[in-house]
Image (cartoon, rainbow, N blue to C red):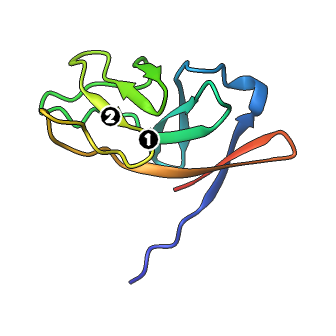
Amino acid sequence: MEMTKQEYAIGEVQDFLPQIGRVVKAGQTELAVFRTSDGTFYAVENQSPHPKGGPLAEGIVSGYYLYDPLYDWKIDLRSGEVQAPDQGRVATYSVQTEDNKVKVRV
């Protein structure tokens, strides 16, 4: 059975402050949504890939990287890959903006 992605409206552009994470629900999935300083939006599952877990929405964004607020792991927002020397991956989701609305595909 093929999983189909569903699009969710999660707010308006001005609802997302640059470099500040925001928690949103898209169906059953809790996401951490970030707007980088250049205005690009990224969404990741709001769950740290660290073995002890934890939220990611309160992490610090620098460029395209998110720093895990509890373990300081560096995560690439574009791919979800944790940067060396740590390892892991967080699920990423496609975000679109249209007519000032922000939508995510889950």
Decide: marks 2, 1 in contact (CB < 8 A)?
yes
Left or right: 96, with 60 as reference point: right
Q: Residue 83: where, in percent of width, then height?
A: 23, 36
> Which disc is residue 44 wearing?
1
Q: Which residue is drawn at the image coordinates 56% and 20% (left, top)? A: 19
Q: Quadrant of the N terminus?
A: bottom left
Residue located at (47% from left, 38% from top): 31
Image spot of residue 99 (x, y percent): 87, 45
Residue 79, given in percent of the width and then of the height, sits at 38, 49
As drawn, 60 above or below 43: above
Residue at the bottom extreme of this rendering: 1
- Position of residue 1 in the picture relative to residue 99 (left or right): left
Q: Which of 12 and 96 is in front in this view?
A: 96
How would you rate the neighbour count of disc 2 (Cα within 10 Å): few for under 14, some for 14-19, many for 20 or more? Answer: many
- The residue carrying mark 2 is 75
Q: In this view, does 54 lie to the left or right of 3?
A: left
- Could you tell me the amino acid type at mark 2? Ile
Image height of 88 relative to 35, above or below: below
Residue located at (14% from left, 27% from top): 52
Labelled disc at residue 23: none
- Amino acid marked by disc 1: Val
